[in-house]
Image (spheres, rainbow, N blue to C red):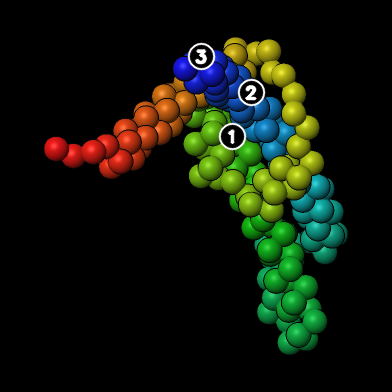
Amino acid sequence: MKFWQILDKFLDRFFVVLGAFLGSQIPEFLQQYVQRLAGHVDELKYIIDQLSQLASASNKSLEQYIQKFVHSSDLDFVKQGEFMQALVTRWQNLNDSLRSLAQSSYFERPFVFLKEMNYPIAQETFYSYQAGINLTLEGLGYTAIGIIVGILLYQLISKIFKFGSQRVASFFRPRD
């Protein structure tokens, strides 16, 4: 009997610590994702600025410059125009995502992230992720939420196992 009590206390604390750790990593992951996203946005902006300078040199707007390529009779130029348009579209989409994340509140941010997430950038962030301790109010808030989720998860799991073990035990009890 003593063993099960010790195991119960250990697992309870384990789930609390695990919840706290995972909760505290949410703002850290989002920060690293935003940094990567901003890097992509900045690089695309640099390329678009270079394209705008080329367009200005021939007295055209960027849109006119791209359309000149897209409407060319040469297939190579058409593909180049489509590529330039894709760069502009990608910059607009990533910039909108970055702006949405920057303007969201601490507790809206994970939901905005899930809505606006660019999967390849999130995947790159995950693969190069460095765990950290975030001592901001946001980090402490998510740590507290993680603790609560850890407690609730352990309570749920322990109740499921308790219910299951009672059902199994009742199956083997002799019947009158």
**Is residue 138 visible to the viewer in this orientation of the structure?**
no
Screen quadrant of the C terminus? top left
Query: Considering depth in this image, is 86 or 53 the residue closer to the camera?
Result: 86
Residue 37 location, quadrant: top right
> Considering the numbered disc 3 on the image, is that residue within a helix, a strand or a loop?
helix
Pointer 3: what residue?
2
Q: Which residue sits at x=65%, y=13%?
A: 136
Q: Amino acid at mark 3?
A: Lys
Q: Find the distance from the CA under tag 3 to the CA under tag 2.
A: 29 Å
Front residue of 25/38: it is 25
Q: Mark 3 or mark 2, which is nearer to you? A: 3
What residue is drawn where x is 76% and y is 37%? Answer: 129
Q: Residues within 10 Å of mark 3 (few under 14, many from 20)?
A: few
- Residue identifier under label 2: 21
Which kind of residue does numbered mark 2 sit on?
A: Phe
Measured from the top left, where is residue 78 in percent x and y? 73, 79
Name which residue type carries label 1.
Leu
Q: Which residue is mark 1?
A: 101
Disc 1 secondary structure class? helix
Q: Position of residue 51 (x, y in %)?
A: 81, 58
Foreground mark, 1 or 2, reads 2
Q: First in sequence: mark 1 or mark 2? A: 2
- At mark 2, the secondary structure is helix
Q: How packed is label 2: few (under 14 Cα within 10 Å), some, or many (20 or more)? A: many
Q: Nearer the viewer, mark 1 or mark 3?
A: 3
Foreground residue among 29 and 83: 29
Counting residues from the start of the chain, the first of labels 1 and 3 encountered is 3
State the image coordinates of residue 114 (x, y, percent, origin top left). 53, 42
Label 1 – label 2 distance at C-alpha: 23 Å
Image coords of residue 18 (percent x, y): 60, 25
Q: Quadrant of residue 69?
A: bottom right
